[in-house]
Amino acid sequence: MIDEEAREELFGLGVRSAPALVVDGEVVTGFDRARIDALLGL
């Protein structure tokens, strides 16, 4: 199932690949554990 609203939001941010994550306005594409942990304060 595709969440069209989420898809459009990511496309608006310039994201064209998966996985993609947005944390406090910061976009992370791919799996970057260190960056994700840093953005989440872990």
Image (spheres, rainbow, N blue to C red):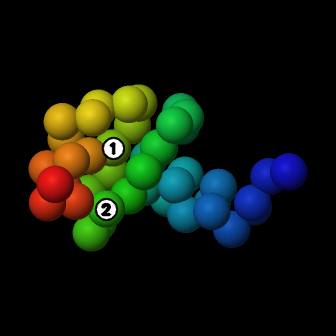
Give amino acid for label 2: Val
- Residue bearing the label numbered 2: 23
Q: Residues within 10 Å of mark 1 (few under 14, many from 20)?
A: some
Q: Is residue 25 left or right of residue 9?
A: left
Q: Pointer 1 and pointer 2: residues touching (CB < 8 Å)?
A: yes
Residue at the extreme front of the image, as rendered: 42
Q: Is residue 40 left or right of residue 13?
A: left
Q: State the CA–CA distance, disc 1 to disc 2.
A: 8 Å
Kindly indicate the quadrant of the structure image that contains residue 34.
top left
Q: Position of residue 40 (x, y in %)?
A: 22, 59
Label tally: 2
Which residue is at 63% across, 62% downward?
Answer: 6
Which residue is at 33% across, 44% downward?
Answer: 28
Relative to 28, say whether 12 is above or below: below
- Residue bearing the label numbered 1: 28
Q: Position of residue 42 (x, y in %)?
A: 16, 54
Residue at the extreme right of the image, as rendered: 1
Relative to 10, say whether 29 is above or below: above
Which residue is at 27% across, 69% downward?
Answer: 24
Which mark is drawn over residue 15?
none
Q: Which SS class for mark 2?
A: strand
Q: Which SS class for mark 1?
A: strand
Q: Is residue 5 left or right of residue 2?
A: left
Give amino acid for label 1: Val
Disc 1 or 2, which lies upstream in sequence?
2
Which residue is at 47% across, 44% downward?
Answer: 20
Q: Nearer the viewer, residue 28 or 8?
A: 28
Q: Position of residue 13 (x, y in %)?
A: 42, 55
